[in-house]
Amino acid sequence: MTVVTLKNLFKSFGKVVATDIPFLKIEDREFFGLLGPSGSGKTTTLRLIAGLTKPDRGRIYLDNEDITDLPPEKRNLGMVFQSWALFPHLTAFENIAFGLRLRKLPEGEIRRRVKWAAEILQIEDLLNRYPHQLSGGQQQRVAVARAIVIQPRALLFDEPLSNLDAKLREQVRFELRKLQKELGITSIYVTHDQAEAFAICDRIAIINEGRIQQVGTPEDIYTRPANRFVASFIGITYFIKGELIKVLNEKEGKVLVSTEDGLEIIATGDLSKLNEGDRVHLVIRPDYVSLASPSDTTNVFEAEVRRATYTGDVIDYEVKVGKWNLRIRTSPLIKLPPGKKIKVKLDENRLVALP
Amino acid sequence: MREGLAIWDIIILSIVVIYLFLPMVVLFEYAFAEIWYAYRLFPSRIGLKWFTWVLRHYDTRMAFIYSYTLAPLTMVATLALCIPAGYVLGTRRGKLSLITENLVNMNMALPVIVIGIGLLPFYVHLGLLNNYWALVPAHMIGAIPYTLRCVAAAFAQVPRDLEEIARVLGANRLQAIRKVYIPLTWRGILAGGIFAFSWSLNEFILTLLLGFPGVKTLPVAIYEYVGGYYLTPQPAAALSLLIVLPSIAIALFLEKYVQVSLGLGGG
């Protein structure tokens, strides 16, 4: 049982604000992501929770216990670094046993627990090896075993997969999520990789310049971005600028947006933040755009194919609608030469209007 | 090209080597010469006469004991100070560390006699003159800058996240130093210790100034043979070799030992 709560947490390095979080609560057993571009302060936030960096002000709680002033060794947390930080002078076994030996457990108990962790991570055969005799994937497993073996109150991950090659990374994501769900340890996962965060985390906080832009499930964040930063950071995003000329349907949040080059586009928006006459940005991603079928009547526009990129599973076209560049993906069987005039349909249920 | 330069290369390198080792040759000659007529280039009879002569004297036997006990004491005390200090200098690269480092380096440039003159009033007031134990801190003054540099450089090479993960896993600062830094930096620490050891063995000015007349180390004992008004180079030479030989043996042994472990270390 561990709930991690941050209150008014603030840390700056000189003039750069690394962390400024008025309130954040990470629920028990939750796999929580801190996602942001590099330099956004997500790692600093993790280090504040670990006790490796001191906050300028604010409090950190594990359940109801205020741990802000505890040194890292008194917090009983598990952590996995980007570099994995295995001790080069110790075998895999001794690396995993490091935290247990500091806790002065009897030798039998240490062996039992290391064996337990090694079995979970499938590294029983590697325990006598030194870190330099292990592959990257194996080192990462030893680092995770070392973090879980002490039965920490929470697990902290600082981009633990970014030193793995792409294929392995994808596989380990699922293993990590499965492991976390089985152990039920509240976990915080820092990454700049959106796909990784989406695959692993239950909820995600998008961070920029030390501040949380949005907290939500991956689906919330993708389909209902809170602001333009979140919209542009997540996925391949194009914006169309226009003016909100009319609210079409108050209940569904449907609005009509007119651009300066005369397009009239139906989109969805949060009406508590939007008023008629506002200047708005429409968030458009490749999966919101499709080739129009004859039955489509609304939100259909003339487009011209500019460029095609064959990626194997799809063809990625850059098209121009009015003066705006958009992307559209089609089956690789549909071949559209550059310059061809086509009709595209923008999905009004997914197109988001932001202030 | 190589051959063309070779003769000048050989000449210049020979000059360097001869320049450095000529005193050693003379030293050996004097130490082993039992009979040596003034007009001859080489001694007429060689033997160990002067070594036994020197070792028969109570003063020189004591000098031996003083030198070879002060050196390890100085080494241990210097390391005890330089390991924690080197940890701070090597891992916390802040303003304070840089200032400290500059001050320590400045100390290396000071002539030892200047330090001695500054120390003398302290020793007089505290009644520490002519005191064996009081020579340890005096020897440390010269040794610290060298030892500290070695130790700090070794600490600086350890990735910071090893210490951090150790802390998160439950180690306090002291345990992190003991269980992570020391095993990874012992070679640098050993090198720093050797510096302190040999500094103490070589130390002359402060020992003469503060330890005289009761505590005479080997360099002071040698000085007594050649200094003053009478000159007895043979016992001085024999004694000098007695200082040099154990040091060379230690240096060779450690060099070999450290080299071997460099290869094994890995990681």
Image (tube, rainbow, N blue to C red):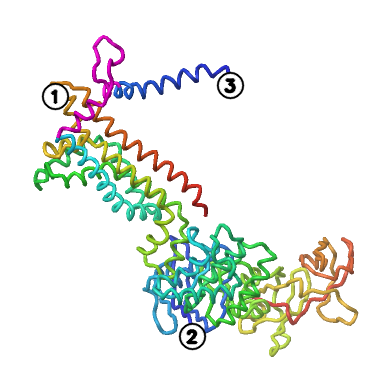
Q: Which dot marks residue B133?
A: none
Q: Amino acid at mark 2?
A: Met
Q: Which dot marks residue B228?
A: 1
Q: How many marks?
A: 3
Under tag 3, what secondary structure?
A: helix
Between marks 3 and 2 in the image, the one whose residue lies nearer the viewer: 3
Between marks 2 and 1 in the image, the one whose residue lies nearer the viewer: 1
Q: Amino acid at mark 3?
A: Arg
Q: Which residue is mark 3?
A: B2
Which of B83/A186 is in front? B83
Mark 3 chain? B
Residue A319 seen in the figure: no
User: Which residue is at a point 41% across and 84% down the rendered structure image?
Assistant: A64
Q: Which residue is mark 2?
A: A1
Q: Is residue A338 shown left or right of residue B154? A: right
Q: Which residues lie in the magenta part?
A: B29-57
Please rate how many residues cluster around mark 1, counting C-alpha atoms within 10 Å: few if below 14, some from 14 to 19, many from 20. few
Please rate how many residues cluster around mark 2, counting C-alpha atoms within 10 Å: few if below 14, some from 14 to 19, many from 20. few
Query: Do labels 1 and 3 touch, CB within 8 Å?
Result: no
Which of B41/B94 is in front? B41
Which of B59/A64 is in front? B59
Under tag 1, what secondary structure?
A: loop
State the separation of the CA atoms marked 3 and 2.
Answer: 75 Å
Counting from the top left corner in percent of width and height, residue B13 is at: 45, 22
User: Looking at the image, is A235 positioned above or below residue A267?
Assistant: above
Counting from the top left corner in percent of width and height, residue A171 is at: 68, 70
Mark 1 chain? B
State the separation of the CA atoms marked 2 and 1.
Answer: 82 Å
Q: Amino acid at mark 1?
A: Gly
Q: Are marks 2 and 1 on the same chain?
A: no
Between marks 1 and 3 in the image, the one whose residue lies nearer the viewer: 1
